[in-house]
Image (spheres, rainbow, N blue to C red):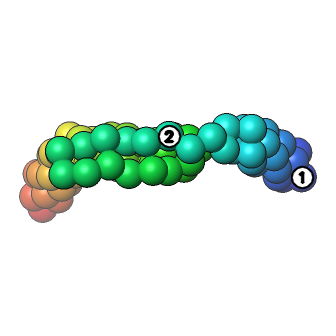
Amino acid sequence: MKMLRYFFYLAIGVVLLSLAVVNSQVVTLHYYWGEWVIPLSLLLFFALCVGCFLGLLLSLKPLLKLRKERSQWRRQAKNGEK
């Protein structure tokens, strides 16, 4: 089963690499203080990384709230056993 998973990851990597090669055109990103000339595939990868980072950052608050709530429940259960 592990071999199948590794094959699947390899297939996805090959597809993504081929898309990066096909989309090697240079795009110009204009912003307030200048411009940035970058390959399209690198720009898409950068946008994906920023989106993943923001999603992770936004999911931290509910996660920390749940961890706090869990520790309170454990403390109450421990005090109730005594």
Look at the image and tell me whether residue 10 can be seen: yes
Near mark 2 (Cα within 10 A), the count class, few <14, some 14-19 or many ≥20, is: some
Q: Which of the pair 46/37 is nearer the observer?
A: 37
Q: Amino acid at mark 1?
A: Met
How far apart, in angstroms, are the residues tagged by discs 1 and 2?
38 Å
Near mark 1 (Cα within 10 A), the count class, few <14, some 14-19 or many ≥20, is: few
Q: Which residue is mark 2?
A: 27
Q: How many marks?
A: 2
Q: Amino acid at mark 2?
A: Val
Location of residue 26 (image quadrant): top right
> Is label 1 in a helix, a strand or a loop?
helix
Look at the image and tell me whether residue 16 can be seen: no
Q: Name the mark nearer the viewer: 1 or 2.
A: 2
Quadrant that contains the C terminus: bottom left
> Is label 2 in a helix, a strand or a loop?
strand
Residue at horizontal 17%, vertical 44%?
A: 32
Q: On the picture, is 37 further left or further right than 75?
A: right
Residue 42, given in percent of the width and then of the height, sits at 54, 49
Q: Earlier in the sequence, mark 1 or mark 2?
A: 1
Q: Which residue is mark 1?
A: 3
Location of residue 18 (image quadrant): top right
Q: On the picture, is 38 further left or further right than 33?
A: right
Residue 37, given in percent of the width and then of the height, sits at 45, 50
Residue at horizontal 89%, vertical 52%?
A: 3
Residue at horizontal 63%, vertical 40%?
A: 25
Residue 29 tag number: none
Q: Which of the pair 51/2 is nearer the observer?
A: 51
